[in-house]
Image (tube, rainbow, N blue to C red):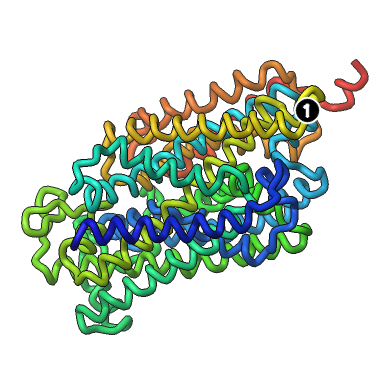
Amino acid sequence: MSPLLLLSIVFAYFLVLLVVAWYTSRNANNDSFFIGNRSSNWMLVAFGMIGTSLSGVTFVSVPGGVAKESFAYFQITLGYLIGYVVISFVLLPLYYKLHLTSIYNYLSSRLGFASYKTGASFFILSRTLGATARLYLVVNILQDAILSSFNIPFWATTLILLIMILVYTYEGGVKTIVYTDMLQTTCMLLGLVLCTWFILNQMGIGIGAAMTQLSETINPQGDPYSKVFFSDPGSKLFFLKQILAGAFITITMTGMDQEMMQKNISVKTLKDSQKNVMVLGVIMLVVILLFLFLGGIMHLYAFNQGATWDAGKLLLDGRDITNDKLFPTLALHYMPQAFSIIFIIALISALFPSADGAITALTSSFCIDILGIKRRADLNEADQKKWRQRVHLSFALIFLLFVMVFKWVNNPSMIGVILKVAGYTYGPLLGLFTFGIITRRTVKDRLVPWICLSAPVICFFIDKFQGSLFGGFEIGLELLIINGLLTFAGLWMISSPAEKAAAA
C-alpha cells in the first residue's frame, strides 16, 4: 500500500474538517466554544457522541482483545446501558436545573470550593491521561503505516496531528465539534460495516457460518471465541462484575466527565438531552457487538492465512499480531488496497473525535474551574478569549508530552490501560458526586482534597496485593467502585449532619 496515497487521504479528510469548522465557527464566541450556545440538535449530539465514546482504542483494541477475552466486553456494554439510564434521569436533571457550564460547579454549591477544585482537577488528570492514551495508539499506527516511510519522527507526527486538531477547534469549540463528530462518526461506522463485509467476503462465508466457526474455535484460555457470559465468580470476567463495572464506568466517564457532558448540556432542553443519552446507549450495544464480531472474524482470517499461537503471541509470517497489532497489520499488509484505504479513513475518523473533544473540554474546565475566568469581573469577553486560546495551546503541548510517555512505555493493549487508569482517577469523582446527591451532610471542605488523594493510593495497594488479600478472587474493573466507596466513606467521616452544621 502506497504511503503517499494514504497520506493524501489523511490530508483530504482534514480539509473536509476545515470546511466544516469554518462554516460552524463563524460569529463564534466564548459561549459557542464552551457550550455551543445551548442550541445543539440532540440527534446530532447523540450520533456524534458515538465516535467520542468509542475512539481509535475501541476500533483497534476491542477486535484485538477477542483472542484472550472472547466476547466478554459485551458484558461491560450491557452495564453501559444501565449507566446511561442513571445519567439521563439523575445527573442531567441536576445539571439543567443549575444551568451549569461546567458540571463541577455543582460540587461548589453542594460541598464547597475546595471540593469543586478537587473534582475539576481529577477530571483534568483523568481526561488528559485517557485522551493521550487513545491518541498514542492511533498515532503509532499512522506512524508505522505512513509517516515512517518519509523519515518523519514519531514526535513530529504527533505534533502535526495536534496542530490539525487545534486549527479546526481553535475558534468554534463545542459548536464545531458537534458537527465534526457527526461527520467522523459516520465515516467510522461506515468503515466498521465495510471492514466486516469485506472480511466475510474474502473468506466466502456469511454471518451464520462465521458465528459457527467462532463457537468451534478455542482461544488460548480454553474458551470459544464467541463466548459472551462468564460465570466464574472469582474471575475478573465474571458477568456480574463486568456489568456492574460497565454501569459505573459510564456514570463516571460520561456522566461526571466535562467533555461528554458539555455536549449534552449544549442541547436545548433537558428532555432532548435525555433522548440523546438513551439513544446513544442503545446504539452502543449494537456497535460494540459488531466490533466484537469483527474481531472474531479477523482472527479466523488470520488463522486462514497461517497465523499460530506461540508463547502467548499470535504470529503471522513472523509478525506479532497480538492484541492492538491485529487489525492494523491485517488491514495494511494482508488485505487488498481498498481495505487498507477503508481502514485508514475509519481510523482517523476514530482519532479526531477522541482528541478534539478532549482538548476542548480540558480547556473549558481549566478556564472556568481552575482559572475562574467566568467569575472574574476584571476580564471582558476579549480577555477571556485570550486566556482560553493560551490554555488551548498549552493542552496541545501537554498532549504531545504524554503521548511521548506512552510511546516510551509501549503497552500492548491500550484499552486495558485506559480502563485501569479510570479506576484510579474517576473513583474520587464518583465518591464526590454520589455523596453530594444522596446525602444532605456538610463536609469539612478543606479536608476533601486529602480524602480524594488517599482513596486511589489505598486502591493501588489493594490492587497490587490482591493475591495475598483475596486469594483466587480477582479484582478487575470494579476497582473504580471500590475507589468511589472509599472516597464516599472518607467524606462521611469528615462530615456532619446539615442541621448541626447550620446550628453551629
Can residue 486 be spotted in the picture?
no
Q: Where residue 184 sits: x, y (%)? A: 48, 61
- Residue 80 lies in what quarter of the image? bottom right
Nearer-the-camera pick, 421 or 224: 421
Q: Is residue 146 above or below residue 215?
A: above
In the picture, measured across the screen, residue 171 lies left or right of residue 420, that is: right
Count of all numbered marks drawn on residues in the image: 1
Residue at the spot 45% in from the left edge and 30% down from the top edge: 398
> Which residue corresponds to mark 1?
375
Q: Where residue 228 sits: x, y (%)? A: 38, 65
Q: Which quadrant is the N terminus positioned in?
A: bottom left
Nearer-the-camera pick, 322 or 145: 145
Secondary structure beneath dot 1 equals loop
Q: Where residue 264 sits: x, y (%)? A: 67, 54
Nearer-the-camera pick, 49 or 70: 49
- Residue 376 lies in what quarter of the image? top right
Q: Is residue 268 above or below residue 466?
A: below
In the picture, measured across the screen, residue 271 lies left or right of residue 6, that is: right
In this view, the residue farthest toward the left is: 317
Residue at the spot 13% in from the left edge and 71% down from the top edge: 304
Residue at the spot 43% in from the left edge and 28% down from the top edge: 460
Query: Is disc 1 surrounded by few (<14), some (14 to 19) or many (20+) residues within 10 Å?
Result: few
In this view, the residue farthest toward the right is: 503
In the picture, measured across the screen, residue 221 lies left or right of residue 275, that is: left
Residue at the spot 59% in from the left edge and 34% down from the top edge: 389
What kind of residue is marked 1? Arg
